[in-house]
Image: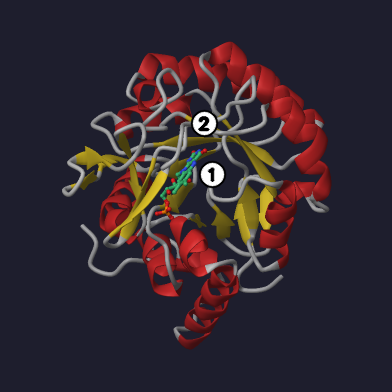
Amino acid sequence: MSRLTVKLGKLVLPNPVMLASGILSHGSLLEKALREGAGAVVTKSLTLKGRKGYETPVVVGVEEGLVNAVGLANPGYKDFLKNDLQMIKEKNRVIVSIAGDGPDEFVKIASSAEDAGIAAVELNLSCPHVKKHGLEIGKDPKLVRRIVKDTRGVLKIPVHVKMGFCDELIRSSLVAEDAGADAVVAINTLPAMVIDVYSRKPILSRICGGLSGPAIHPIALRCVYELYRELSIPVIGCGGVKDWQTATEFLLAGAKAVQVGSAVAIKGLKVFSEITEGLAKYLKEYGFESVDILMGSLEGKK
Ligand SMILES: Cc1cc2nc3c(=O)[nH]c(=O)nc-3n(C[C@H](O)[C@H](O)[C@H](O)COP(=O)(O)O)c2cc1C
């Protein structure tokens, strides 16, 4: 076991740096991300039926980030499990993200994904730009309880819950923990929009989308810090990780692992080895025997 090995409940990963959901969709690219050093990969959020997504433009670069409204484009869970998943050798390092439109869809997709041999599921309760699949779920603690309880009830593998930044973040996360969630992932993109002043039009075809990248990192960091203090289950930090320093900030704030999204789109897959090598060096230099010891070891916390 190296210093970077991390135990996330039942999951044992070679390092705590995962690919975030939605950045790479095709099975061959997920396999490549694992080969390039990701500790685990999270799939694009899968829906019951395939979705084409919205018309282009669906992603636009802004200072320090991206704004996207892709519209949960995916081939549907059956196609993904049959085709894309089969391109990945180590299915025990694949986390399937699910975007259901209610408890029954989450349960159906999660059960099939478990049967296909994956490591864990991540319930997307926080997409900011698709109605019935998004933030409104995470904002509704009652619905969170039902979705998590029903899904947990039928699965043996870990159930992770992906939350967005909202007033109910802590309350909904506590409810998710109480309903049996094994980890909380925080955060998804933040509601945003971009306007082109020359055409006087919004740039994204859907007008509004979600902001990701370095711009949201300090917000995500605070969410992780607060969740770590409230929850007993592991927290996975997501939002603006671009190098080993931003990843380490999440670990110090209390995250057990981190996810990288926009930086993969911007820097390419080499970002995984860059982060893990930098983190390993930091652990050694500062005398931390493992990532676990580093976790939450923030000096001067109140
Ligand atoms: C183009 C794009 C597509 C995304 N699709 C999904 C998705 O399908 N499901 C999901 O839970 N999050 C999705 N996300 C959100 C990311 O997983 C992540 O939570 C967010 O981008 C913050 O991380 P980052 O700053 O490292 O990008 C998407 C993000 C981007 C940029």
Res. 117 in view? no
Relative vertical location of residue 277 with respect to residue 240 in this rendering, above or below: below
How far from the left and from the top, in percent, is residue 185? 46, 43
Relative vertical location of residue 130 with respect to residue 265 in this rendering, above or below: above
The disc at residue 4 is: none
Q: Name the residue under label 1.
A: 22
How far from the left and from the top, in percent, is residue 135? 36, 27
Q: Nearer the viewer, residue 73 or 9?
A: 73
Crowding around mark 1 (Cα neighbors within 10 Å: few <14, some 14 to 19, many 20+) is: some
Tell me the mark number nearer the camera, choosing from 2 and 1.
2
* Residue appearing at x 57%, y 35% in the figure: 45
Q: In this view, does 265 lie to the left or right of 188?
A: right
Relative vertical location of residue 230 with respect to residue 51 in this rendering, above or below: below
* Residue appearing at x 67%, y 48% in the figure: 11
Q: Which of 94 and 43 is in front in this view?
A: 43
Of labels 2 and 1, earlier in sequence is 1
Query: Label 1 CB, ligand 1: below 8 Å?
Result: yes
Q: Name the residue under label 2.
A: 53
* Residue appearing at x 78%, y 47% in the figure: 91
The residue sitting at the bottom extreme is 285
How far from the left and from the top, in percent, is residue 249? 36, 66
Identify which amino acid the numbered label 1 is placed on. Gly
Crowding around mark 2 (Cα neighbors within 10 Å: few <14, some 14 to 19, many 20+) is: some
State if disc 1 and disc 2 touch (CB < 8 Å): no
